[in-house]
Amino acid sequence: MITASAAASAASLLLVVDGPDLVGGSSVPILILVLALGGFGVAYMLVGPGKRKGPKRYGDIPLAQRPYHSDEELEGPGLERAMAWGVAFAVFSSLFLPLYWLIEPGRINNRVDEFYEQDVASGRAAYQNACASCHGVNLEGGSAPHPDPSISTAWPAPTLNNITARYADSAIVTDVRQHILLTLRYGRAGSPMAAFSVGSGGALSDNQLESITAYILSVQTGELPQAQGFVGQSRDTLFANNCARCHGENAEGYIGPQLLNVFERYGWRPGDDASLEQAKAAVKQALVNGRLVPGQAPMPSFALSLTDEALDELVEHLAGIQVTGGPAAGQIGGDPMTAVSED
């Protein structure tokens, strides 16, 4: 009956608290403590501490020489005190643990949201300092000076506020967040995109890179660019605008592999129309899906920026410059001068 009365008195304290405030309020830890201590106090006062009997204890008597409790005290007030503390702690635990179990997940989620907002805010500042000059203040894209000083044409910097949508169906980038983070950390060799990680010679810590990534992902618009058509452009112009900056102005290779014998690498044999069509289909597939090049920046998909007709024209442009006898692998840079032209 004593325990039940204590629990009932403590439970009455809970009726004063509004349910939603209990779960999501900022003073939840204090509320838990007050309720638990209140139940502890109620239980302790109802049971009673008991009165100590027996000889008085004097402070000038050494502990080792003081007589211990009598049997009467151990079996009476001492036992009552122990029971009182046991009931009080039981009530405290019965209130504190369920309340903590109910409230802790919400508290953790709130803290996660707070940390995320802090990351986004610091990432916004870091982005403006490190990235905005090329990719735009609002991630709308821009340009950077070409890494080859002899080339005056600017290097396009892609739009970043739709990167999630651009890679939504990508076969080469399955984790956009990891893709952004790795690009920030290691940069893109041969392009204006420098490595920003301290471990790669940059000036930003891993926490700063994580913050920039969080900011980029927080402002995604989901809007995709309208595909560019072929009308009004020559094949040479299409290649120069979309491919030359990575594969070289003459397809000789730069930060991307040379394309002068790419058909041969895909199985083309001169005079064999079937193998020619097979090679064209493979090249177009690479344009549509992109490619993951080990140790290099991935080749992006052009399906969103170029129409199907424009992609076909790019394939035909490459078909017109193909030679045979080149390297079996598409090396980065270099000129397969040993190739024999079929023209």
Image: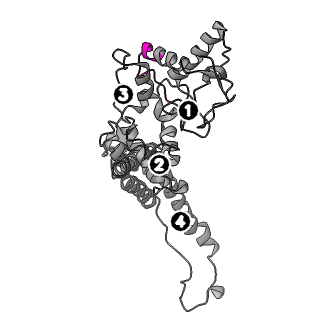
Q: Quadrant of the C terminus?
A: top right
Q: Tags 3 and 1 in contact by the CB under 8 Å rule?
A: no
Amino acid type at image mark 3: Gly
Residue position marked by numbered label 2 in the rendering = 194
135, above or below 69, in the image: above
> Which one is in front, 175 or 25?
175
Residue position marked by numbered label 3 in the rendering = 222
Mark 2, residues whose alpha carbon is within 10 Å: few (<14), some, or many (≥20)? some
Residue 204 x, y percent position in the rendering: 45, 55
Whether residue 335 is visible to the viewer of this picture, yes or no, is yes
112 within the magenta span: no
- Name the N-terminal-most of marks 2 and 3: 2
Q: Quadrant of residue 150?
A: top left
> Which one is in front, 300 or 29?
300
Q: At 42% across and 48% down in the image, what residue appears?
A: 211
158, above or below 11, in the image: above
- In 3D space, how far apart are the residues under numbered discs 1 and 2 (Cα atoms)? 23 Å
| Closer mark to the observer between disc 4 and disc 3 | 3
Q: Tags 4 and 3 in contact by the CB under 8 Å rule?
A: no
- Name the N-terminal-most of marks 4 and 3: 4
Amino acid type at image mark 1: Glu
